[in-house]
Image (tube, rainbow, N blue to C red):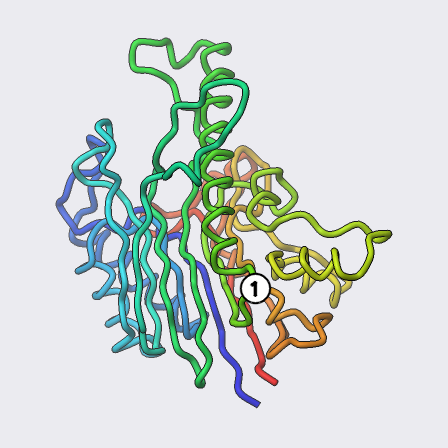
Amino acid sequence: MKKIKIGTFNAYNLVLPNTTYYGWKKYSPEEYRKKISWMGWQLDTMQADIIGFQEIFHRTALEEVLDSSLYCKDYHIVMSKPSSAENAPDLAPIVALATKFPVIDYHVVEDFNEMLMLDTEVSVPIFQFSRPVLIVELEMYGQIVTVFVVHLKSKRPSIPKEADADDPFEQAKGQARSLIRRAAEATALRKLLLQYLEKRSYPVILLGDVNDSGGAVTTEILAGQDPMSYWHKEKKIKYWDVLLYNVKNIQALKSYQDYYYTHIHNGHHESLDHILVSQEFVRENPNHIGEVRYVQVLNDHLQDNTLSREGVEGWQSDHAQVVATIEFE
């Protein structure tokens, strides 16, 4: 029986040394070497065949990470592009994918076209993903698979420069702006996903930092709503055809314990990094071609800074890495 391992990895600002980003931050050569070595070690622990990365600033840096890994040497790399928004910084993070499987095709989506626009009673002037989405077609063991690599808007408050960032009400409005943008991005991404899910029989995988928990509304927008139990079977089948399933929930159904968290902020253990798969990898689907067998979360390096003064090293990631093992029938 063949198996694959798929992972998502928020690199937490993978930037070349002595390069200023976000206005004032930069790595010294020593810190950069530590980051490359640590990420390579994590990749060797993950041993994933497909990895979706977030917060990549330079392709060269990602190539050095893969070269430092014993397991991921010579992987193919596909990268997104920086946002073209007027207020976007010259040097900005993007998403990327590394894989041992052949890349058939890929494209990057940044703009919301008319079909992707969020239509509400209130005008929402959001026309682009804050970080363009990467869509990659792969061939694995003779099977075509579409992989989405995403990084949605964070929970960090969006506060105008002229406003007082320490004002509690300005912070509340900033959080609302971030939530609205994340919801708009999730809705646009759902529309993109439907184009690959509806009436197609090959798998779709979503890898990324969606900056919300598995049960959050924005994450549920991405996955779609489960059909109601009293619906007739034909209607249920249409819904099942376009659903995505969180590997976290698949694992939870098999295990007595749930220690799934990928980020700690102000003492809150959150799951922000997710892997979603279409029904082709869900055992309950009678036509499945494989199934999720095991999910691993590499979060031992995370520290709760409300309890410990140690914290996460600047050259590590402030996110855990998630790996799902899928076995083909």
Residue at 36%, 50% in the rendered image: 133
Q: Quadrant of the N terminus?
A: bottom right
Give the quarter of the image for residue 112: top left
Element at label 1: loop
Q: Residue furthest bottom?
A: 1
In percent of the image, x 35 and y 72: which residue is there?
99
| 81, 62: nearer the viewer | 81
Q: Position of residue 273 (x, y in %)?
A: 50, 51
Left or right of residue 262, residue 124 in this image: left
Is 4 above or below relative to 18? below
Foreground of the two, 140 or 257: 140
Q: Position of residue 197 (x, y in %)?
A: 53, 60
- Label 1 neighbourhood size at 10 Å, few (<14), some (14-19), many (20+)? few
Vertical order, 100 against 204 (above or below): below
Please provide percent x and percent y for residue 154: 44, 36
* Label 1 sits on residue: 199
| Quadrant position of residue 249 | bottom right
Res. 40 image quadrant: bottom left
Q: Give x and y (percent) for residue 228.
A: 80, 50
Specify the amino acid type for callout 1.
Lys
Q: Residue at x 75, y 63 (%)?
A: 253
Q: Residue furthest left?
A: 18
How many marks on residues? Answer: 1
- Quadrant in which the C terminus appears: bottom right
Residue at the outermost right position: 230
**Pick the front one: 148 or 1:** 148
